[in-house]
């Protein structure tokens, strides 16, 4: 994973889960809307990387640029979340991290998802 200022952007699952449980981070799903609608981390917002310009103004105005933001997509080789994280850093977000293979590892650990009827 590419580094940013000497720090890896990757966040370990336990750390991401702790922020989730304390409601201290915003999770941004970088996958397209169809996949997001099929299921996503509970409370996550959809900011599809390939349509970031269309969604950015809908999603970002309510976000605190100082608060932790965790981007994710799915699959070990998915770079969408990484691209989105770098984009957000360039847009002035201070604490942006990437949960690598986020959707899969989140589900495998039985963490809260939506829709929950799956």
Image (cartoon, helix red, strand yellow):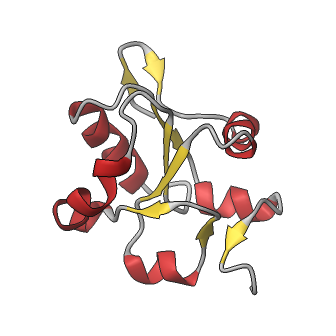
> In the rendered image of this protein, does residue 74 appear above or below residue 90?
below
Q: Position of residue 46 (x, y in %)?
A: 42, 65
In the displayed structure image, the side of residue 108 where residue 27 appears, left or right: left
* Quadrant containing the C terminus in the rendered view: bottom right
Q: Position of residue 112 (x, y in %)?
A: 75, 63
Residue 57 vs residue 38, the one in the foreground = 57
> In the rendered image of this protein, does residue 6 appear above or below residue 60?
above
Q: Give the residue drawn at x 68%, y 45%.
A: 20
Q: Position of residue 17 (x, y in %)?
A: 73, 43
Identity of the residue furthest to the top in this view: 6
Identify the image quadrant of residue 58.
Answer: bottom left
Q: How many marks?
A: 0
In the displayed structure image, the side of residue 17 where residue 43 appears, left or right: left
Residue 61 vs residue 28, the one in the foreground = 61
In the displayed structure image, the side of residue 21 where residue 25 appears, left or right: left
Q: Position of residue 80 (x, y in %)?
A: 37, 56
Identity of the residue furthest to the front in this view: 62
Residue 80 vs residue 36, the one in the foreground = 36
Identify the image quadrant of residue 39.
Answer: bottom right
Q: Give the residue drawn at x 44%, y 27%.
A: 95
Q: Give the residue drawn at x 66%, y 63%.
A: 104
> In the rendered image of this protein, does residue 2 appear above or below residue 22?
above
> In the rendered image of this protein, does residue 70 appear above or below residue 44?
above
């Amino acid at each position: 994973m590419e580094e940013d200022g000497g720090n890896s952007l990757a966040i370990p699952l336990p750390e991401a889960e702790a922020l989730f449980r304390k409601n201290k981070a915003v999770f941004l799903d970088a996958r397209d809307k169809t996949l997001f609608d099929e299921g996503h981390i509970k409370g996550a917002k959809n900011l599809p990387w390939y349509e970031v310009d269309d969604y950015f103004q809908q999603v970002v105005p309510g976000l605190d640029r100082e608060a932790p933001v965790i981007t994710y997509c799915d699959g070990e080789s998915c770079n969408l979340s990484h691209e989105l994280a770098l984009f957000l850093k360039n847009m002035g977000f201070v604490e942006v991290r990437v949960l690598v293979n986020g959707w899969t590892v989140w589900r495998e650990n039985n963490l809260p998802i939506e829709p929950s009827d799956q």
